[in-house]
Image (cartoon, rainbow, N blue to C red):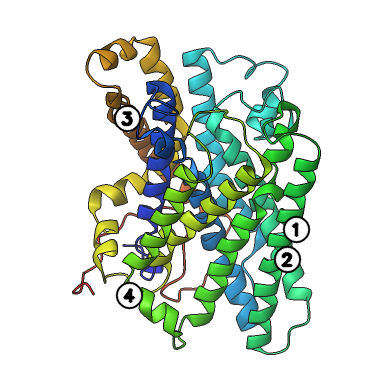
Amino acid sequence: MNVRATRFPLFDSMRAIAVLAVVATHGAFFSGLGGHGSAAGPYLGRLDVGVHIFFLISAFLLYRPFVRAGIEDAEPPLVRAYAWRRFLRIVPGYWLALTVIALALGLPGVFGADAPLYYGLAQIYTPETSGGGLPQAWSLCVELSFYLFLPLYAALMRRLPAGDERGRLRRELAGAAVLVLVSFAYKLWILSMGPATAFRLVPWHFALPAFLDTFALGMALATLSAWYAGRASPAPLRVLDRFPSLAWLLAAVAFWVVSTRIGLVGRAGEPLSESQYLGRHWLYALVGLGVLLPAVFGDQARGLVRRLLALRPLLYVGLVSYGVYLYHFAVYAQLRRWGFGSLASDTSPWLWLPAGLAGSLLLASLSYYAVERPLLRLKRLVPGRERTEAGEAIAEPAPARPPRLTQAG
């Protein structure tokens, strides 16, 4: 296990949960399991919550080094090293996947006049290209904008007066609250311009401010995690340490509500009222928070939930999750071209999900070991201000042994 991951050994499993949710919801689209006619449809349609889990993971892992330095009044991470590592982690793998898939499937527009948009992860900013290229990459475009925003925000927070360490903690939490309010105001402004599903408003819905509250929640988690490292935990965190399943119960209830209690059926492109649009967004954030909490706070070798997260297959899926994310939609599309739908209709539409996952894992494994992992070694070319304190969060997947488990509470 990477020594810097000793306090957060289960984050690859968090990535696995997120990407499995995304693969399942897109599998429901290809199989026809989503929407009316299937008891599982409303739940499968809401598994796009995996995107919000990814956003929370990124916000927590990337902001924690910045906020820890801010609270301790220490030197922050070097922005040039941060930017270089983000580039290596995201861009080469995406460029390769986009090129290979565009050639294999004949994706329109990728090699034409709009190529700079697709290769620059800017396709979401025009309605005509927002669904082109790799359709799922809209969330990667949002991630990229967050990567650019984060060091600027961290620098601003450091300039604000705070006083002692506790003052710096309050400053960070207040900053996260402001981001939530800004995101809420932004969403209200979008909704004032037309229906939530209006095609002309797609670029506004995909812009970073629409998801800034979700990222802010992850940043607040990073703040509390950095603050309570080496300090006595408050009563709620001690309860979470003892009973991590409570957080997952919260996530399960929120997921049930968003799937069945706000009037959505799980069909792709279904109409949304303003209350449904906002309710879905906030319930997704609550689901992501509940899923993530056991991997952030408490003894990472304690409890049934963490035993499940420590399973080697889940850790491996998380290790190669970026490739799964990049290739799974194309795998489904190719299966449909091969007539897989006829086979599935003769047996079970549920076959789409394991078939899509198997193909995605194969391509993702090739991507990770042949492209992503070798390229990540180049991060040493731009050295950072390394801090070797055990327990630092890492933004890249790290091959890990399951933690030694203690008796579950």
Q: Nearer the viewer, residue 204 or 156?
A: 204
Which of the image's four quarters has the N terminus? bottom left
Residue 369 vs 178, above or below: the answer is above
Mark sitting earlier along the chain (3/4): 4
What residue did someone put label 4 on?
299
Residue 375 vs 159, above or below: the answer is above
What residue did someone put label 2 on?
178
Quarter location, residue 305 = bottom left
Residue drawn at x 41%, y 39% is 43
Mark sitting earlier along the chain (1/4): 1
- Kindly tell me whether residue 74 is visible in this rendering: no
Query: Which amino acid type corresponds to the residue marked 2 in the rendered image?
Result: Val
What residue did someone put label 1 on?
182
| Distance CA(mark 1)–CA(mark 4) | 35 Å
Label 1 crowding class (10 Å Cα cut-off): few <14, some 14-19, many 20+?
Answer: some
Residue 311 vs 302, above or below: the answer is above
| Distance CA(mark 3)–CA(mark 2) | 40 Å
- Regarding mark 2 in the picture, which secondary structure is present there? helix
Quarter location, residue 323 = top left
The mark lying in front, picked from 2 and 4, is 2
| Distance CA(mark 3)–CA(mark 4) | 34 Å
Label 3 crowding class (10 Å Cα cut-off): few <14, some 14-19, many 20+?
Answer: some
Residue drawn at x 39%, y 54% is 252
Q: Check whether the beta carbons of the residues at disc 2 and disc 1 lie within 8 A of each other.
A: yes
Coordinates of residue 377 in the picture (x, y in percent): 45, 50
The mark lying in front, picked from 1 and 4, is 1
Q: Nearer the viewer, residue 233 or 399?
A: 233
- Regarding mark 1 in the picture, which secondary structure is present there? helix
